[in-house]
Amino acid sequence: MGRLVNQHYLNQLIDRNTGMFTRTATGRYKDFAATRGHLLETAKLRQVGSYLGMTLETLSRIRSGSY
């Protein structure tokens, strides 16, 4: 059972790291909102931007739709 749990989290980590290089900033934000949208309400935007690998200014532009 432990091996399966470990494998699941390793696959999530690999997908996240691959996405950091292959997706645009808008794509990373949309994926984050779709999978972990509840964190947008509770976490600070600075923390979300850091997790997504973008500056706070870029995150604000994406959220406002001007990016």
Image (cartoon, rainbow, N blue to C red):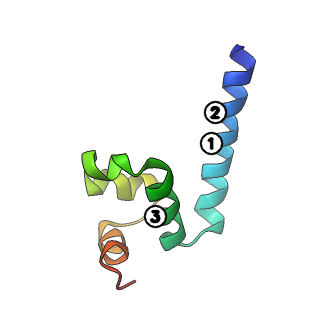
Three-letter code, disc 3: Tyr
Q: Which quadrant does the C terminus fall into?
A: bottom left
Q: Are marks 1 and 3 in contact (CB under 8 Å)?
A: no
Q: Is residue 46 left or right of residue 18?
A: left
| Tag count | 3
Question: In the rendered structure, which amino acid carries the disc numbered 2?
Answer: Tyr
Residue 31: x and y in percent read 52, 60
Mark 3: secondary structure:
helix
Image-quadrant location for residue 23: bottom right
Quadrant location of the N terminus in the rendered image: top right
Which comes before the other along the chain, label 2 or label 3?
2
Amino acid carrying mark 1 in the image: Leu
Q: Position of residue 41 (x, y in %)?
A: 27, 50
Q: Quadrant of residue 45?
A: bottom left
State the separation of the CA atoms marked 1 and 3.
17 Å
The image shows residue 19, relative to residue 9, as above or below, that is below
Q: Secondary structure at mark 2?
A: helix
Badge 1 crowding class, 10 Å Cα cut-off, few under 14, some 14 to 19, many 20 or more, is few
Farthest-out residue, bottom: 66
Q: Which residue bears the numbered disc 1?
A: 13
Left-right relation of 13 to 4: left
Q: Crowdedness of circle 2 by 10 Å Cα count: few (<14), some, many (20+)? A: few
* Residue closest to the eye, 3 or 55: 3
Reading the image, the residue beneath label 3 is 29
Name the residue that disc number 2 marks: 9
Which residue reaches farthest top? 1
Quadrant of the rendered image containing residue 4: top right
Q: Are marks 1 and 2 in contact (CB under 8 Å)?
A: yes
Q: Residue at x 35, y 85 (%)?
A: 66
> SS of the residue at dot 1?
helix
